[in-house]
Image (tube, grey):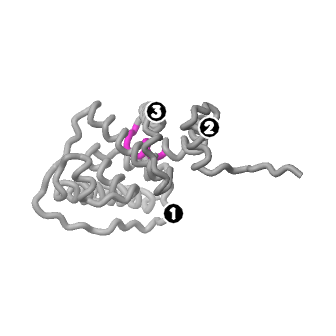
Amino acid sequence: MKIIRLHTSDEAVIKKVLHGDSRAEKQLYDRYAAKMLGVCRMYIKDMHYAEDVMIQGFTRALDNLGRFRFEGSFEGWLRRIMVREAIDFLRQRTQLYFEDISEVEVSPFITDNQDMDAELLQLLIDKLPEGYRTVLVMFAVEGYSHKEIAEMLNISENTSKSQLFKARKQLQEQFGKIRRIENER
C-alpha cells in the first residue's frame, strides 16, 4: 500500500526550495500568499499595491531563505519580512507623518458591537492617516511592542504610543457615528 502525504511540512518544502525545486517555491507561495496578502493589506490601502508588496516580500524571502534557521515558525519569519516590506513601501511612496505628544493615556478600545463586520473595520482602518494606521496594525495586529515599533519606524516610543492613542480615538469616534446612524433607523 502506498501512503500519500497530503501536507508536507514547511521544513521539507524549504529544503526543496534551497535545492532549486521551483515546484516547491510555488507550493510555499500557494500555502502563504493569502495570509501574507492580508498582512500587506492591513498596511496598504490599495489592493494592487498590497499585492505588489507581497510579491516583493516573497522575492526577498526566497532570496534570503538560506538565512532561515528553522528555530521559529516559517510563517512568523515570512510575516516579519512582509511587515518590513510594507513599511518600506509606505516610506518610499510618502513621508510617514507622526505626531509627537508628551504624555499619552492609553485607553482600551471599546465597542458595543463585538461582531463588527471585518470589511467595515478594514474600511475604517484604511481611513486613518498612514502613521496612525501603521502603528495601530503593528501594535494591535502584529503584536509589536512600542519599543520595537519605534526602532522599526525610527520614531520615539512616545510617538508610537501617541499614534496608537489617536488611532484608537479616531476609530471609536467613527464607531460612535455608525452607532448613532444605526439608532436613528
Give the CA separation, mark 2 to mark 1. 38 Å
| Coordinates of residue 12 in the picture (x, y in percent) | 61, 47
Looking at the image, do the residues carrying marks 2 and 1 touch, with CB atoms under 8 Å apart? no
Q: Where does the magenta region start and end?
A: 38-45
Indicate the quadrant where residue 140 lies: bottom left
- The span from disc 2 to disc 3 (Cα, nearest Å) is 14 Å
Question: SS of the residue at dot 2?
Answer: helix
Q: Quadrant of residue 126?
A: top left
Q: Considering depth in this image, is 111 or 94 the residue closer to the camera?
A: 94
Inspect this view and state whether residue 155 appears: yes
Q: Residue furthest left?
A: 102
Name the residue beneath numbered marker 3. 59
Helix, strand or loop under label 3: helix
Image x and y of residue 180, in percent:
38, 60
Q: In this view, does 27 lie to the left or right of 74?
A: right
Question: 42 above or below 20?
Answer: below
Say which of marks 2 and 3 sits in front.
Answer: 2
Q: What residue type is labelled 1?
A: Asp
User: Outermost residue, front direction?
Assistant: 19
Looking at marks 2 and 1 on the same chain, the residue that comes earlier in the sequence is marked by: 2
Q: In this view, does 90 lie to the left or right of 37?
A: left
| Mark 2 Cα shell of 10 Å, populated few (<14), some (14-19), many (≥20) | some
Residue 115 badge: 1
Q: Quadrant of residue 61?
A: top left
Q: Is residue 5 left or right of residue 68?
A: right
The residue labelled by disc 2 is 24
First in sequence, mark 1 or 3: give its number: 3
Judge depth for marks 2 and 1 and give the one in front. 2
Dot 3 amino acid type: Thr
Residue 47 is at least partly visible in this image: no
Label 3: few (<14), some (14–19) or many (≥20) C-alpha neighbours in 10 Å: few
Q: Where is residue 7 in the image (x, y as percent from the top left)?
A: 69, 50
